[in-house]
Image (cartoon, rainbow, N blue to C red):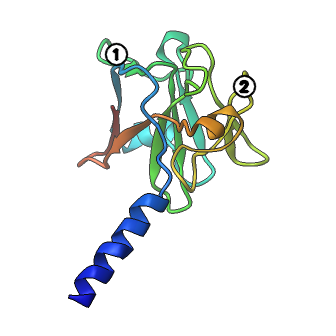
């Protein structure tokens, strides 16, 4: 009985001490970026931390990427990074505090954080996926919208989807 009660108390402490981050402020918009093979991934993907790449179909970024009619880059574009374990991670580039498709985060290369140019919010995109570090987004606990990166497929390619 003591062990059962201790387990319940421990679980209650864990669940009440965790901060809840709202990472669902960006409207649900289609995301589909295909890297069909290892060659495409090597050209347009990310190899290792702190690599990053911006995908914005309406602006044809990155230059030369073979977008198709089935390619979608989310609400504000897609930020693709590689963490220290060489695992690719993807986020919507729209700042969750501003929630406008034209207000896009960018990577501060010196501090290795994503930054909103409008409100100044900073986000951890390499170690703690999309977690707000400072600024109004941190005060409101608004994290970046994260997308799924699937792969590698049998040809060494990857797919990013919502």
View extreme (right): residue: 110
Foreground: disc 2 or disc 1: 2
Residue 28 rendering spot, x and y as whole percentages:
35, 21
Residue sitting nearer the eye, 80 or 69: 80
Residue 158 rendering spot, x and y as whole percentages:
34, 41
Residue 76 appears left or right of 71: right
Q: Which mark is residue 119?
A: 2
Residue 58 appears left or right of 122: left
Which residue is painted at 55% across and 12% down in the image?
59
Label 2 vs label 1: CA separation?
33 Å
In which quadrant of the rendered view does residue 150 lie?
A: top left
Residue 118 rendering spot, x and y as whole percentages:
72, 21
Q: Residue 112 carries which label?
A: none
Residue sitting nearer the eye, 13 or 104: 13
Residue sitting nearer the eye, 25 or 105: 25
Which residue is painted at 42% across and 31% down in the image?
24
Quadrant housing the C terminus = top left
Where disc 2 sits, the SS reads loop
Which residue is painted at 54% across and 15% down in the image?
101
Where disc 1 sits, the SS reads loop
In which quadrant of the rendered view does residue 113 lie?
A: top right
Q: Mark 1 points at which residue?
A: 68
């Amino acid at each position: 009985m003591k062990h059962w009660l201790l387990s319940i108390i421990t679980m209650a402490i864990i669940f009440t001490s965790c901060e809840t981050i709202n990472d669902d402020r960006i409207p649900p918009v289609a995301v589909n970026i295909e890297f069909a093979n290892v060659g495409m991934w090597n050209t347009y993907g990310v190899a290792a931390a702190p690599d990053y790449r911006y995908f914005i179909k309406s602006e044809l970024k990155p230059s030369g990427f073979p977008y198709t009619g089935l390619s979608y880059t989310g609400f504000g574009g897609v930020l693709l990074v590689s963490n220290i374990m060489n695992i690719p991670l993807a986020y919507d580039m729209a700042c969750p505090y501003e929630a406008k498709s034209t207000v896009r985060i960018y990577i501060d290369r010196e501090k290795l954080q994503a930054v909103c140019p409008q409100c100044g919010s900073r986000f951890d995109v390499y170690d703690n996926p999309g977690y707000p570090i400072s600024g109004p987004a941190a005060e409101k606990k608004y994290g970046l919208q994260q997308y799924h990166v699937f792969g590698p497929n049998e040809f060494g390619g990857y797919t990013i989807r919502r």
